[in-house]
Amino acid sequence: MKHTQLKPFPKDFFWGASTSAYQVEGAWNEDGKGPSVIDIREKYPEGTTDYKVASDHYHRYQEDVKLMAEMGFKAYRFSIAWTRIIPNGTGEVNPKGLEFYNNLINELIKYKIEPIVTMYHFDLPYALQARGGWSNRETIDAFVEYAKVLFENYGDRVKYWLTINEQNMMIMHGKALGTLDPNLEDPDRELYQQNHHMLVAQAKAMDVCHQMLPQALIGPAPNISYIYPASSKPEDILAAQNFNSIRNWLYLDAAVYGRYNKTAWSFLEEKGYVPTIVEGDMEILKNAKPDFIAFNYYTSKTVEASNGEGNDKNNTGDQEIVIGEAGVYKGHNNPNLPKNEFGWEIDPVGFRTTLREVYDRYQLPIIITENGLGAFDKIEEDGSVRDPYRIDYLKKHLEQMQLAITDGVEVFGYCPWSAIDLISTHQGAKKRYGFIFVEREEFDLKELRRIPKQSFYWYKEVIANNGENL
Ligand code: BG6
């Protein structure tokens, strides 16, 4: 639809950006922090660093927040490391861990930046994984116990809560993300059992949040991308519907309506992945109601029909590269879209489509909690960092978001990835996303100096004008 006049961004729009604890903080074993599944990962992809120091945000958060304030951030979405708060996953609470996030939250509030807290972003306590992780129903209780500690300690200042970051990607791409338990005997089936437990844990946490903090708002934070059919062939349309259900709606239907998406369920039945659901679980899912939907969007996906012969599945995929499922769908390169340096397609219009689709299906306010471009930024001879490609990516996505707002979609915030350079999930320190450059290399930590990039100044302008002159 072409609009003759665009609706403006809402007045109190949350302009900000995102990070996650293990990718930015460093201090991996300091002040009583316990190990997470990320810390004990035995191997990192070749040529990539670990997360021990990352961007050293743990020690430099004041400097970082000051820079965010200089950009004019109205919100900052970060995650809390479960293992800083409860080092063993359950039991004793670590006062030093509580103190760090208390300080961070206070620092944000000092600059009138709204803290938006992700409770769990890939870094499950290792102590829980050693007892089966999400395969073990006890992890549901551990998550609820942890959630209560967060609500008790930060609920007076934190109003916006996100339960689990990209649960769908942990299920579908756990190997690339480093969250997959290497000891699982039958990962494909087991993952959907884990998924079910996470859905129950999320529902319980939303419920507890509403009971403990009546003023607070809470929602899920999956990675959502609309799926296109490779052609108008009816079989390709069905394949796109299949993948939309398996990748997207399975997670949101459960979070919002408390039910399993039928197409996704028939996929689970067909593959033998149906989880064990105990009495009361569906009740718990039904009773929990999110207040909003947060989602991460990087690009759309395209699929064609899979003829089911042979196996369309392989393990080269990551969060944004579609693989396939024999007889269900098969990844397809979209010839209409350019790709970034890491092979991810770039599709700003798909962002509008995805926003419209999510809003149509769920009718809840939306906040974008990730969107961005990974690139090999570098310091120029004059000391600046120029990233016009990132500005171009973000600008085009913001334009499409404004069109979606004009279409009627209720969007209340935009927190792209990432506020500051951090370590990619599986492509190291050299794959950068931030508005703020962190001077370090893959294996050479250098000074970890902060340098505002060209996109920093561009975003500052966008925020100052409330997105008026994109
Ligand atoms: C999302 C994750 O999948 O994508 C982030 O929530 C991640 O943790 C981001 O960093 C970008 O992906 P990558 O693999 O380039 O770091």
Image: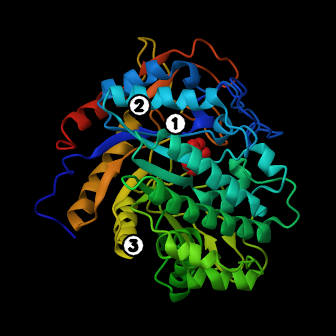
Judged from the image, the secondary structure of the residue bearing numbered disc 2 is loop
Q: Which residue is mark 1?
A: 375
> How far is mark 1 from mark 3, CA to CA?
33 Å
The label on residue 362 is: 3
> How far is mark 1 from mark 2, CA to CA?
9 Å
Decide: marks 1, 2 in contact (CB < 8 A)? yes
Task: Determine if residue 234 is in view.
Answer: yes
Residue 315: percent from the left, percent from the top? 75, 59
For the C terminus, the quadrant is: top left
Q: Nearer the viewer, residue 239 or 267?
A: 267
- Looking at the picture, which amino acid does disc 1 mark? Ala
> How far is mark 3 from mark 2, CA to CA?
36 Å
| Residue at 18 percent of width and 67 percent of height | 2
Judged from the image, the secondary structure of the residue bearing numbered disc 3 is helix
Residue 82: percent from the left, percent from the top? 64, 42
Q: Residue 247 sits in which quadrant? A: bottom right
Mark 1 or mark 3, which is nearer to you?
3
Residue 31: percent from the left, percent from the top? 68, 23
Quick check: 164 left or right of 292? Answer: right
Q: Nearer the viewer, residue 427 or 65?
A: 65
| Residue at 69 percent of width and 58 percent of height | 141
Decide: marks 1, 3 in contact (CB < 8 A)? no
- Of label 3 and label 2, which has the lower sequence position? 3
Kindly give the residue lying farthest to the left in the view shown. Answer: 4
Image vertical order of residue 184 relative to residue 151, above or below: below
Mark 3 or mark 2, which is nearer to you?
3
Q: Which residue is mark 2?
A: 387
Q: Residues within 10 Å of mark 3 (few under 14, many from 20)?
A: some
Judged from the image, the secondary structure of the residue bearing numbered disc 1 is loop
